[in-house]
Amino acid sequence: MHETVTWGLIGASTIAREWMVDAIRKHPSGAVRSIVSADLERATSFAQQKGIPNAYDSVAEMLADPEITAVYISTTNDRHLPDALAAIKAGKHVLCEKPLALEASEAQTLVDMASNKGVVLATNHHLRNMDSHRAIKRLIDQGAVGKVNSIRLFHAGELPESLKTWRLHDKAAGAGVIYDITVHNGDLLRFYLGANPTKISAIAATSGSGPRHIEDSVMSIWEFPGDILVQCHDSFVVGYGPRGVEVHGSAGTILGIDVMSQAPGGSVILRTKEGDEVIPLEMNVTYERGVADFIAAIQNRGKPSSSGEDGVWSLKLARAVAQSAATGQTISIEPT
Ligand code: NDP
């Protein structure tokens, strides 16, 4: 029997509604007690819809509840830092959405504060918890494609109508495809390769109808140790393309087809001189694995699948992409 972990949610968001409340409840220790929104009516309606006992419009009030030991933060990107700071200060364990903040130095402050307070801080990077990406990593680690020389990553889709809000229009809230999507690529590539890139170059554009100062598309090139080159295409305006990844090595290629998503699915194929092998995949819900690892870390039985430090790195890499796109320069990544 595991001790109950009682959660408070900061953010009446789509991801909380569609995935995270259910993922927390799926865990034998997970109980959702409260939700906070800036708007009490939105919090109350969310609480009613999902059967959550308490609704607040004050983060401080919710955090004052000693029953709550864990907090999930899924507000707009600019709110992650203040919300996470408040939760850590209140002694709560924090599972925070990506990006952890708008700047890597701010995210590092969260990591340091969580460490001082002795609470767990984790980043909700979901791709590394998907069965498809775990299978791809296993194949890389087993040497199934020999020495990896390049990766092409297609993370370009179209935003659903309901999400064409702050992500497209509100720079101060942390809009743009780089904070939204590229940050996930950084985490996934580090997960695959167990290393940080050394250089990044990028060009960004506004291809859709959003404000010109907010990018909705970016293409970037990353260099990893061992002369591994990576090409990423991230976009909000590609309606019909497959979202996947190709890992090329000296002895073969791994094709991850339709694997850049939130829902389980897609396929993984190993292509070598022997022909194509379809890799069998389980179809677990990625967010359930993230919650389970976070709870295991709280209960001293494991560690988060994506830690606070991982969240600092993914943000640092996304910011390097943004900086390269803004300046036209190739950005060198400091190793620490
Ligand atoms: P939403 O736009 O659905 O929600 C974000 C915030 O916007 C909410 O917290 C809410 O503020 C406000 N909001 C929501 N609906 C309304 C409305 N009708 N009117 C006014 N304000 C509203 O965002 P997402 O759920 O898509 O994303 C939330 C966070 O989660 C982001 O940081 C994003 O990067 C991350 N995310 C992560 C994913 C992952 O796989 N790890 C996938 C999707 C998102 P309030 O709480 O004050 O009500």
Image (cartoon, rainbow, N blue to C red):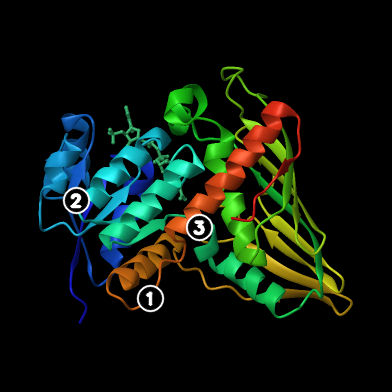
The quadrant the N terminus occupies is: bottom left
Which quarter holds ligand 1? top left
First-in-chain label (3 vs 2): 2
Residue type at tag 2: Ala
- Name the residue at 22% across, 33% down: 42
- Real-space Cα distance between discs 3 and 1? 16 Å
SS for tag 3?
A: helix
Tag 1: residue type? Gly
- Please indicate, yes or no, whether residue 291 appears anywhere in the rendered image: yes
- Label 2 secondary element: loop
Q: Quadrant of residue 12?
A: top left
The location of residue 124, given as percent across then percent down, is 43, 54
- Sequence-wise, which precedes: disc 3 or disc 1? 1
Q: Does the numbered disc 2 mark a residue whose Cβ is under 8 Å from ligand 1?
A: no
Single out the mark in the foreground, 2 or 1: 2
Label drawn at residue 90: 2
The residue where tag 3 is placed is 310
Measure the alpha-carbon separation of dots 2 and 1: 23 Å
Image coordinates for residue 166, horizontal then vertical, percent: 44, 27
- What is the x, y in percent for residue 198? 72, 53
The disc at residue 281 is: none
Mark 1, residue position: 302
